[in-house]
Each structure stands twice: as structure tokens, then as C-alpha cells.
Amino acid sequence: MTTETTTPPAPAEDAEAVLTAVAAMLRSILDEYGLDDIEVEWDSRFHDDLELESVDLVALAGKLAERYGERVNLAEFIADLGLDEIIELTVGQLVAYVTAALVGADTDAG
């Protein structure tokens, strides 16, 4: 009688790990504008604090997809928001979305 062992799926990244990853992605985008001195924190707003344009959100979506795959879809997340909500969107809100998407993906896989 043989016993099969399976490796459990890796746990979803915690919010701090996601914040670190998202901040690194944002810094790489901001570096292109010479804005490497801007702090990226939980309450940093994409529009007002980080001065991101829509093209930057597209670049961020690509970086998120590259790291997390299709389980994190920035376009889908933003599509559910109104214009005022998009303008006021914070890094913390994005981190919460990514963390929840990763937990949901782990639940679906398990």
C-alpha cells in the first residue's frame, strides 16, 4: 500500500508582503518620471499622491499580472469603481484587493 503525498498550495501572501511588492512595482513606474523620492504607503493615493496617469495604471496592471497571474485583474477591480473612487484609490485599497484575490485563489485551488 502506497501513500501519496501532495504538497499543499502555498499560502496567499500577507498584506505586508503584497504592500512591499506593489510598492516596488509603483517605484519602478515612478522611476521613469524621476519621482523616486515619493513615499509609497498604505494611504498613498494613486492620483493625488503618486501622480499616476491612466497609462501608469495599465503598466501596473501588467506588473500585477506578471507577478500574480490572472487571479489579480486590476482592470476588473477598477471597472467596479466610480470615477471619484478611482481618483481617491489608495495603495491600501489595492493591497486589500490583491490579498483577497490571492486568498480566493488559494480557496479555489484547495
Image (cartoon, rainbow, N blue to C red):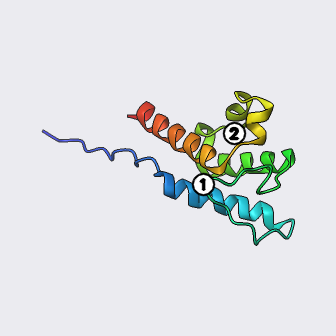
Residue toward you, 24 or 69: 24
At x 74%, y 67%, the residue is 38
Q: Is residue 27 left or right of residue 16?
A: right
- In the picture of the structure, the residue carrying the numbered disc 2 is 74
The Cα atoms of the two marked residues, 1 and 2, are separated by 17 Å
Q: Is residue 23 left or right of residue 104?
A: right
Q: Position of residue 70 (x, y in %)?
A: 62, 38
Amino acid under disc 1: Trp
Crowding near pointer 2: few (<14 within 10 Å), some, many (20+)? some
How many marks the image carries: the answer is 2
At x 48%, y 34%, the residue is 104
Q: Position of residue 63 (x, y in %)?
A: 70, 52
| Mark drawn on residue 42 | 1
Quadrant holding the C terminus? top left
Q: Residue furthest left?
A: 1
Q: Position of residue 27 (x, y in %)?
A: 72, 64
| Mark drawn on residue 21 | none
At x 69%, y 39%, the residue is 74
At x 24%, y 41%, the residue is 4
Quadrant holding the N terminus? top left
Instruction: Label 2: state its secondary structure.
Output: helix
Q: Is residue 29 left or right of residue 110?
A: right
Crowding near pointer 1: few (<14 within 10 Å), some, many (20+)? some
Q: Position of residue 12 (x, y in %)?
A: 45, 47
Amino acid under disc 2: Leu
Mark 1 vs mark 2: in front:
1
The image quarter containing residue 97 is top right
Instruction: Label 1: state its secondary structure.
Output: loop
Which sits earlier in the primary sequence, circle 1 or circle 2? 1
Cβ–Cβ below 8 Å for labels 1 and 2? Answer: no
